[in-house]
Amino acid sequence: MTLNILSLTPLPQTIQEQIQAVHPSASLTLAPGWFDGEIRDTWPAFTSNRYVAKGSNGNGTRGRAGCVAGDGGDRRGRLPLPA
């Protein structure tokens, strides 16, 4: 079994190493900004404007989520809390 982790936010190298050290099967894919366009299209304006960088439209779509993560399985995540 492989644990595929897709991060939509940039992660420092030390955090990446900690995630990958949890288990040998953990596979981390970094995709910051990739789904910003989809977020803008599907989230309320107030929320997307707080979460997505101004002018960022990303390259991804719902159909591409599995391709970026390498599998097409379930997607669950945690968003950063607003500052």
Image (cartoon, grey):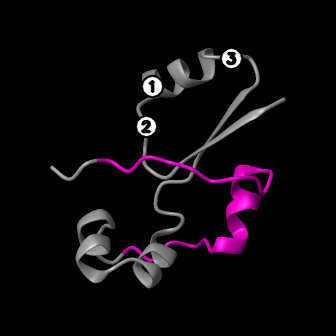
Q: Which of 15 and 44 is in front in this view?
A: 44
The mark found on residue 11 in the picture is 2
Image location of residue 9, percent across then percent down: 43, 49
Q: Do callouts 3 and 1 mark residues in contact (Cβ within 8 Å)?
A: no
Mark-to-mark CA distance, 2 and 1: 6 Å
Magenta range is: 56-80
The residue to which callout 1 is attached is 15
Residue 52 on image: x %, y %: 33, 67
Q: Which residue is drawn at 53% across and 64% down?
A: 34
Residue at the outermost right position: 1
Q: Which of 6 and 1 is in front in this view?
A: 1
Residue ID at (50%, 72%) = 58
Which mark is first along the chain, 2 or 3? 2
**Residue tagged 3:** 23
Q: Nearer the viewer, mark 3 or mark 1?
A: 3
Chain-order first, disc 3 or disc 1: 1
Q: Residue at x 20, y 53 (%)?
A: 82
- Which three-letter amino acid code belongs to the residue tagged 1? Ile
Q: Are marks 2 and 1 in contact (CB under 8 Å)?
A: yes
Three-letter residue code for mark 2:
Leu
44 horizontally vs 46: left or right: right
